Amino acid sequence: MSIDGQCKKILQTLKCHTSDVTSCDFATNFTLVTGSSDKTVRIWDWIPGSGYVQRSNSPLKGHKYQVTCVRISPQGSMLASSSVDGTAVLWNLHSCAKLYTMTQVNGDPIRVCRFSPDSSILVTAGDNGAVCVWDMVHRSLIKTLFEHEGTTQSLAFTPDSQYLVTACSLEVIRVWYVQDLIDTTSDTVSSITKIDNALDMGVFSVDICKHIIFDENNPLIRQYKLATGGNSNEIKLWTITSKSVLKHKLSSKHEVIIEPYDIYDGHSSSVTCIRYSNNGAYLISSSLDKLVKIWDNNGACIATLEGHNRYVNCVAISKDSSLIASGSTGSNDKLIIIWDLTGNLSLDSELFHQTLSIQNTNGIHEFQLTENTDVNANEVTLLEKIDDIAEGAINSCCFFGNDLLATGSGDKLVRVFKVVEENNNIEEISSSPFEGHTYAINHVEFSKDGTMLASCSLDGCTTIWSTTTGEKYTSMPKNSLSVKICRFSPNCELLITAGDDEKVFIWNVNTMEKQATLEGHLDTVTSACFSPDSEVIITVSFNADFRIWSAEDYRCLYVNEDAHEYGIQSCDISQNLEPIPNVVQSENLQLDELEVKLWRSLLGHGGNVVCVRFSQIVSEFVCSTATDRQARIWSVYSADCLYVLDHDSIVTSCSFNLECSLLVTGCLDKTLWLWKLPQQLVFQTAVANKIHCRSKAVIEWTTADIVKWLKDIDMKAIIKNAQNTSLNGEKILTLSEEVICSGLDLGNLKIPHEYLCPITHEIMREPVTCSDGFTYEKNAIAEWFMSGKLTSPMTNEILSKTDYVYNLDLRNAIHNFLDAGESNISEDES
């Protein structure tokens, strides 16, 4: 909406904080959050008839000292607050529950915090100049930047999440490429450009306009508008020009230039805070001169808001530009003033039509509904310890899906079980056990599609069984020595076997012919695995080395001769094709340029590690078993040990089920242990599978990325056309819409935009339907889950699952609706 400077008026005055109001922010549904030197964060909801009313579970008391900044996440599910106490706290905005506490380097005071526009990261900065980058999905510190020498009080992201701007008290502005910041494989990173002497006496506040200007002649060039304010009474405007240039087919470089283009001069003292309106048409500023000013894009001050008696520390503007909130300091003020920019609002006004219910009909707060009554909700629970299923040690166990379980034991038998959903009891299927081996089973493994089960044994034999009937499909030629490992390739075309003869054999599953023999290890090959794309093979041995081989021509690509001090007993590879968070992956692995780095070391076991296994799908977790009679569950990305599971004997094997709700462990004392994993692990697995922490810049999209995106939005019908035209990101940005649509045969295809999301109350771009039957904007419901909520935003009931499906019918309806609206507008204008 447009702002008429003549219509402004004070709508409401809030006085609740007992000290200076230091920060404020609006959510998409008009919820207001304020922070203060009184150590509290307060949440205000708009109630027609009363105006802003403080929520009953407010204030939030999570800081020991002054709160310096509050920011609401882009979709309105989370709230971040920072403090002089050196911490930033992540809150669930709806339940007011504390989700996570982040501590700045050396515990120094934090002055500012900002979410990226895609909600994937949070950045904090403060007195020591350090800028900390936090991964919001895994709640872990990704990187700390130390280039600023002064106090860093200002942060801002470009609206496409491509760049981060930081500014400090020594008048320096730096621009960072976000992908560099969140690359967890790189130890060092530098800003891509900087400006010295940007603002006299230091920068207090920066903001970037949400409107991006694209070059008409070169869509790879884009401009952002940056505003800065500080100890000077001036507001300086800058253009950040970014040019993406392809270095080669797999990556691009970014040329960034910052140039000043205007100065807004109207305040008589230091500018404390500046904020762009959501549509980018206006800039709001506050100052020590006790004034709030509204500027248009031409630099004209269209309104001056007078009402504070002391310095104005902070300002925020609602998403629809109808309201401004400003907070002030001083012993006789400490006010939050709500300004009406329309001139038409009153305390009785309805600011929005639909809201998230904070209370249910019985007056129970939402946060109470989300509390799990199970006291063990966040603990691993032993469901069953079975000691009568085998007459020998359980040497191997493997899940397929959520409920099919296989074991191999010292009694020569392979057994298959079904986990009953109702009570999680284990029941052996009718065709089990599978008999055929003459000595102890060393390993069992399901094929990716679950139709086959492979087993290998001390007898030198490897057998493939029918999972359902137990019939023997085939056996590989007998080896004279023990076979330690047998594993299927994810595409089910190959089987790898290896063992005491120091050789690795690759077999064609369909013909049972030997494809290759891999030689080079100097001791027993203890374990092996395929990459999730079936392109690479990894083998390990007792000789402490591991080797990486091409699955295409079986070349040895890499050798690490001394990976572990006392030999390697087990290996596994993440099933996630993008295993390291926030690292852009190329379309095809360049095997000739293979580089291997030690990424994490997990320390905690008191004995030899016997088995390691990733959780399935996105591989958020690792389970390890050892001779210390323990199994440990680790977070892959934080390297923290989450749970320690004690057993009565050496733990030989482990396996997660598909959704990470169950874990099975086998022991040397013939026992099989079934564990129920806490809901938070299930939740994190589901969320990580839905939320991509970072995405490539569009220019870097390969044809494979286009295909994956089309699959995600259920437009599989045009995938072949995209492949035939070799459509990639560079073509999307540089070719005309007509050329692209023609190549994809999209003449009559309608690509929808969106209706109102129940969470954001904004038009949906990617409507998805959840298990509660309601439809939400995909990013909004993903952020809802990321904030720790497992309830329906509409009913407050616990969701049975966090899956969702794209609502294509609604997308088309929204598109038609918007088209009709544009037609009507055109007719009216004519």
Image (cartoon, grey):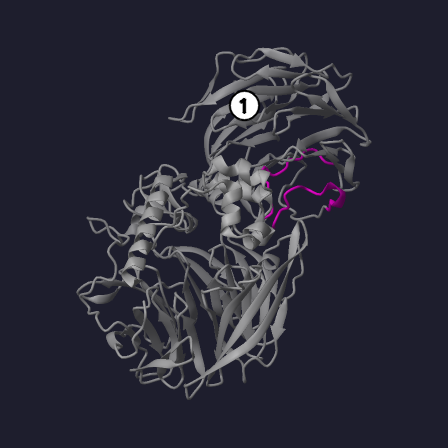
Q: Residue at x 73, y 41 (%)?
A: 591
Which of these two is toward me, 265 or 390? 265
Q: Regarding mark 1 in the picture, which secondary structure is present there?
A: loop
Q: Does residue 719 appear in this view? A: yes
- Residue of label 1: 450
Q: Residue at x 29, y 51 (%)?
A: 366
> Left or right of 247: which side holds 70?
left
Tell me if residue 594 is in the magenta stretch. yes
**Looking at the rendering, in which quadrant would you find the C terminus?**
bottom left
Q: Which residues are magenta?
A: 567-595
Magenta highlight: main SS: loop
Residue 375 percent across, percent down from the top left: 38, 42
> Left or right of 489: which side holds 715?
left
Circle 1 crowding by C-alpha within 10 Å: few under 14, some 14–19, many from 20? some
Amino acid at pointer 1: Gly
Tell me if residue 694 is in the magenta stretch. no
> Left or right of 824: which side holds 485?
right
Q: Is residue 333 above or below residue 796?
A: below
